[in-house]
Amino acid sequence: MIHLFIGLLLSSLLGAAELTELSGCVSRDGVAINYYQKDSLKTSGKKILVFGQIHGDEPESGRLAQLWISRLENLSPSNTWRIVPLLNPDGTKLKTRMNANGVDLNRNFPTKDWSDIALKQWEGYHKKNPRRYPGPHGGSEIETRCVMKHIEEFKPDVVVSIHTPYGQLDFDGPRTKHIKMKALPWKRLGTFPGSLGHYLWDERKIPILTIELKPDSLDKYESEFDYLQDQISFLAD
């Protein structure tokens, strides 16, 4: 039943856009976590990897990923894009932040400090808040390993992770200048044991832009997010 739910959801939002299956990229409940790719004809272009809805109760994050896919369908982009619009299909069905195992995927990446800090921080600072549970060990979740597989295979120049609801842009990378946006301010959130930002930039020097939407961001400023999509490649310079 969950397969049908997710299939209908993506079909209604993406229309005729074709999604591709990456071997091994499924949810705990066996739902395929597919991606969209649009290649650039320019050899000088950047490779941009986007993840939407890593948290199942953040539907606006998936909506932005889907809007960008629809836009790419009508463009000949100067960069190569790979977009995973729905990374946590089980959590989306359940309307939970976590996946079907009750794990916060954005605290589950196997960073070097995971074993020493992640569970202790969850037990102490987060007081065992189930929404922040990092899992039994780093990289324990199949969805987490799907992200890692995309990174290894695609070898992105910059990664975008879309979230809600804090209403800000957070960039971990070498560039200090920001893209001018009215919709959202730039503010550093920092990285955490097991977070994608820590896994990518702190440990692998792959720049990552975390977009934290407000609930009404896309309705009010959709054209600004079109502009942001066009400018993201400059963050990799």
Image (spheres, rainbow, N blue to C red):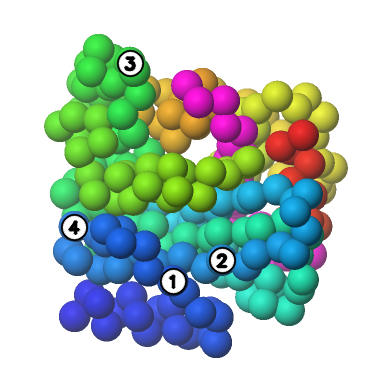
Q: Distance between the residues labelled 4 and 3?
A: 25 Å
Residue, disc 4: 28
In the visual, does 129 lie left or right of 22? left
Q: Which of marks 4 and 1 is in front?
A: 1
Q: Which of marks 3 and 1 is nearer the N terminus?
A: 1
Q: Locate residue 47, reporting x and y percent.
A: 64, 50
**Label 2: few (<14), some or many (≥20) within 10 Å?**
some
Q: Locate residue 2, reporting x and y percent.
A: 22, 75
Q: Residue at x 44, y 71 (%)?
A: 20
Task: Indicate whether 235 appears above or below 189.
Answer: below
Residue 231 among magenta residues: no
Q: Locate residue 214, reporting x and y percent.
A: 60, 52
Element under disc 3: loop
Q: Type of residue at label 1?
A: Thr
Q: Which of marks 2 and 4 is nearer the N terminus?
A: 4
Q: Nearer the viewer, mark 2 or mark 3?
A: 2
Q: Type of residue at label 4?
A: Arg
Q: Which of marks 2 and 3 is nearer the N terminus?
A: 2
Q: Earlier in the sequence, mark 4 or mark 1?
A: 1
